Amino acid sequence: MQLSQSNVNDFLSLPSLFPTRNSPQFLHLSLSLRGCVPGQTGEDSINSSKSSNGAINKKQRKARTAFTDLQLQTLEKSFERQKYLSVQDRMELAAKLSLTDTQVKTWYQNRRIWLLDRL
């Protein structure tokens, strides 16, 4: 088949199978792919999830860890010796203090930032 100007014009006049960037279908598609619901603010869509019945539930944040005095003393002593822990050291310290690996990792990160802010 030979392309002529009329064939091109006919093709361009056909409705598009795919939504264009300016079409409402494209906006709805891009928002749904990002997990956003139209009418929700960005923060609402990040902090919410849909339940099986379609209702939106707020995602609960984990409560802040209240370290005991003994845990804090041990973490501080360990931090004085070593500013960075290996994975093995972190896991051992977490087990010794009855904390999770992530709690020890986060405490070290926060403590290093606190130290940098004071310098």
Image (tube, rainbow, N blue to C red):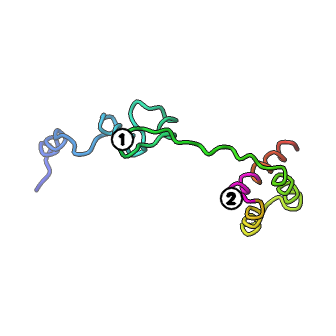
Residue drawn 83% across and 51% down? 72
Q: Amino acid at mark 2?
A: Thr
Q: Amino acid at mark 1?
A: Gly
Measuring from the top left, give residue 61's x and y in whole percent. Answer: 59, 43
In this rendering, would 45 be left or right of 100? Answer: left
Q: From the viewer's perspective, is residue 89 above or below residue 74?
A: below
Q: From the viewer's perspective, is residue 22 above or below residue 65?
A: above
Measuring from the top left, give residue 81's x and y in whole percent. Answer: 88, 61
Disc 1 and disc 2: Cα gap in Å? 33 Å
Q: Nearer the viewer, residue 41 or 69?
A: 69
Task: Classify mark 1: residues with Cα within 10 Å, few (<14), some (14-19) or many (20+).
Answer: few
Which residue lies under the disc numbered 1? Answer: 54
Q: Quadrant of the C terminus?
A: top right
Which residue lies under the disc numbered 2? Answer: 100
Magenta-drawn segment:
98-107
User: Mark 1 or 2 closer to N-term?
Assistant: 1
Q: Is residue 109 magenta?
A: no
Q: Secondary structure at mark 1?
A: loop
